Amino acid sequence: MTGLRAWAVVALLGFCRREPPPVGFPSDTTRPPPPDARRDVTVDAPAPFVAVDGLAVPGDGTRLALPGGAVAQAPEGERFGLWLPADLDRDGQMNDALATRVDAQGQTVGLWALRAAASGATRVAVPDAEPGDRTCAEGALRRTSPRGVVLSWSCARTGHRECALVGEDAAPGPRFRAALVPPVPAGTSLALHLEALDEDGDGQDDAVVTVTAASARPGAAPRARARALYLRRGGVFARDLSEPEGSLTALVRALREAGSRRRGVSGVLALSEDLQRLRRALCAEAGAPQVLVNGAPGVPCGAGAFAGAPDAMARALLSAGEYPAVAALLRRESAGDFGPVTGERVASELRRAAAPERGVTAQAGPFVGGDPGQLPAVRIGVLSLEAPTAPGGVRLRGPVSGRVDLATMVFTGSDGRADEVLPRALSGDRVLVGFAEGCDGEGLVQCNDVAACAQALQPGTALLPVGASRVLLSTLTSDALAARCRSDGAAVAVRAEASLRVLGLGADGLLVAWRGLLYRARPNEEPRLLGPGEALGGPYPAGGGVSENGACAVLSTPEGVWLRERGGWRLLAPPELAGRYGQLTDLTVSDDGRAVVGLLGTQLWVLRRAPRR
């Protein structure tokens, strides 16, 4: 009976598991007790079932003593791996067993039903209990309810995960299967769990599929989890339409709650990314789900599952003072996977929180020639101030070089070279030339051979030039590329990223603005988000979107020019440029933040803030 006692107390973490829900009973506490009720009599509620993991068969695995004393013998060339006591003949005694079949190569290839008999134990192979991928060597066995056992396989080499729900009747066999098919996206960790649980209390086990998504960074906590519920009705499983939408809307609520805590932007962004990972793995609407349920790809997640995510993100960013990022969420082209914020409420709150600064003027300067639209999208600005504070002139570099005198607004020009505005990579020997996404994420492309690389790196290209590499800004990709990565792990898409701006290359690394947030990037390091109160580092070379001393940074958006000082973001929206703020390019700013210059097409504009009082 040693094995039976061990089975009754073992409750280890397993592959396909979930903590069982509490069992509740309806009651009416408003009624008085009957006259003959005894106050000293209590009735204990039945304890919830504790899931049990399969036990390793002792010895060499060729023989297994069942709880009732009968002995089962493994066939030649196989052994028993894990086992669980069972009542296969429904006689009320747990003297039978289920045991995994392990072949000579150590692979779990199926399941045995072992029935106790007077003459020993009979051995019957459980039908349809083989892994979909026969290279899956690691098997697990777990009882999740009094009636239900889950057999699972995992393939460390391919990332394949598969679970089968096994019934315990006269002919036990898998009744429900779920799988997680490779390849798992780079930068992502996915887990699949299947359980047999009586969720609706009708005495029959239902199937619960749980999928968890997280970043693959070491130590990253799993933040996003959703489940799909399949209720057993008349011998078949029918999906409960409240899931996974209910789980996902709860995650969106958690996203909103995380954002209500000031300075919680990093956690909100991480949860948002994990929510995107979960959506792509589980939801049929994502286009290329990796979860299969009874062979069908993905689960319908529901139109409203993620409806509140953009609003929750926007409110978190608004609370943290990340106003340009809130503005980015209001526009479809920069909003991300979950789409833009809908409705006027967030836009109104943004206008109240970040009203345009008073006293800002804009002065039109000369046309300086050369179309910025012909310049590389990823570049350091073509403009630089002659002096970091109170400049008397503006220098131009790139295809058109020269100087603009700020007192007379006279331009003196000369020929130049386009590669002068390409930002040199942090290693010093490479140059950033564009933006591309691969299966491992999105980022800036850097090359040695600038001319050949820039020529080949055109938006829409599906191949990086020879020798090119990327500085990743995110380990996520777009939905479209994620679908391609399922069949081609080397897939690449070069694209123009309108919401990306390289601000400067300073002593502390590369400073970029992406979707309204500021990041510092270094070689072989994950980009670091810089909050509104954090120092930008420096010093920086003249001419970028960050001042030379690192005190200020500037971004242009349709709402106006956002200027970042140590105290946070301020909005400059002079009436002279109304309706054209988003067209400003190549902005640069003085060390004291009082002067900003930029190009509107080929015309120079100078923005000046009112003197400090």
Image (spheres, rainbow, N blue to C red):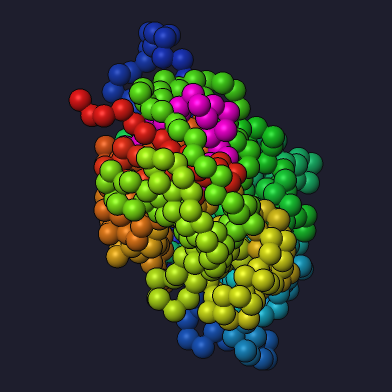
Q: How many tags in the picture?
A: 0
Q: Position of residue 306 (x, y in %)?
A: 60, 37
Residue 512 lies in the magenta stretch: no
**Left or right of 249 on screen, residue 38:** left
Looking at the rendering, in which quadrant would you find the N terminus?
Answer: bottom left
Whether residue 464 is situated above or below residue 143 in the rendered picture = below
Whether residue 402 is situated above or below residue 63 in the rendered picture = above
Looking at the rendering, in which quadrant would you find the C terminus?
Answer: top left
For the point 34% across and 53% down, the residue is 386
Whether residue 312 is situated above or below residue 506 in the rendered picture = above
Nearer to the camera, 173 or 518? 518
Using the rendered image of the protein, determine whether residue 272 is visible from the camera's viewpoint. Answer: no
Which residue ends up furthest to the left in the rendered image?
Answer: 613
For the point 56% across and 44% down, the residue is 367
For the point 44% across and 31% down, the residue is 362
Nearer to the camera, 409 or 321? 409
Highlighted range, magenta: 568-585
Q: Position of residue 369 (x, y in %)?
A: 59, 51
Residue 449 placement: quadrant: bottom right
For the point 69% across and 60% down, the residue is 459
Q: Position of residue 226 (x, y in %)?
A: 57, 46
Using the rendered image of the protein, determine whether residue 586 is visible from the camera's viewpoint. Answer: yes
Nearer to the camera, 137 or 536? 536
**Left or right of 464 on screen, residue 431:** left
Q: Position of residue 547 (x, y in %)?
A: 33, 50
Nearer to the camera, 288 or 178? 288
